[in-house]
Image (tube, rainbow, N blue to C red):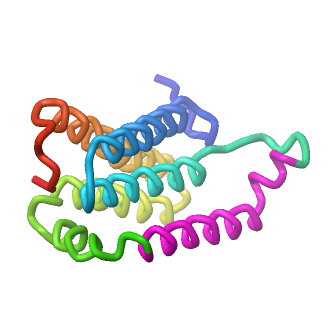
Amino acid sequence: VSVSLDESGAIETFQLAFLAGAAALFFAAGMMRARASRMFCIGMAVLCTVFFFREREIDKIGPITGYLNSKIFRVHEAILVVGLALAYLVFRWQFVGEVARFVFSKAAWPFYVAAVFLLIGAYCDTQHGTVAMQIKEEIFESASYLSLLVIAAGLCYQYSRNSNRKRFT
C-alpha cells in the first residue's frame, strides 16, 4: 500500500479536516454554553485553529501565500492570539478559576489523552531519518486531532441531551 507522507498527502488532509471540524464544534459548543464552560470551549476552538494553521501547507505562488508560509505570519498569529486571549481574560477574569479547576481535574482526562498523543507525535517528528518514525508521527498527530474532534462532538451532543447543564461534567 502506497501512502503519501509528504505535507500535502492524504494523511495531512485528514488531519486538517479533523482540526477544522474540532475548531467548528468547539466554537459551536462554546456558543451553546455559558460562563467558564464557554470560555474553555472558545479557547479550545482557538487552539484547534492555531494547530490548523500550523499543519496546513500552501504552495508559495504569490505574495499572500508567501506571507502565510513565512515566519512573520507565525509572529503575527502569536501576537493576535495572545492579544485576543488577554483581552478575553481581562473581561472574563471571574471564570479563570473555574476553568483552571476543570483543566487540573480528573474530568479533563480526554484532553490529556489528546495532549499525550500530540507529544508522542512531536517526539517522533524530532527523530528524522526513518519512514517508520514519520509514519508514527502522522499516526499520533492524527490520533490527537481525531480525539479533539470526538471530544468537541461529545460536548455538543452532551449539551443537546441536557441543555440545562451549564457547567463542566
The picture places residue 34, in percent across and down from the top left corner, at: 26, 52
- Is 125 situated above or below 32? below
- Residue occupying image coordinates x 44% and y 76%: 90
**Could you say where residue 100 lies in the image, as x and y percent from the top left?**
23, 73
Q: How many marks?
A: 0
- Is residue 74 a member of the stretch shown in magenta? yes
Q: Residue at x 54, y 47 (%)?
A: 52
Q: Position of residue 117 (x, y in %)?
A: 31, 55
Viewer-side residue, 122 vs 95: 95
Choose between 60 and 30: the one closer to the eye.
Answer: 30
Give the camera-side residue of 20 and 38: 38
Q: Residue furthest right?
A: 62
Tell me the residue at 50%/47% (across/down). 131
For residue 78, above or below residue 35 = below
- Give the left or right position of residue 135, taking residue 54 as reference: left
The range drawn in magenta is 64-90
Asked if residue 139 can be seen in this view, the reply is: no
Dominant secondary-structure state across the stretch colored magenta: helix
Quadrant housing residue 62:
top right
54 left or right of 15 in image: right
Q: Is 160 on the left-hand or right-hand side of 129?
A: left
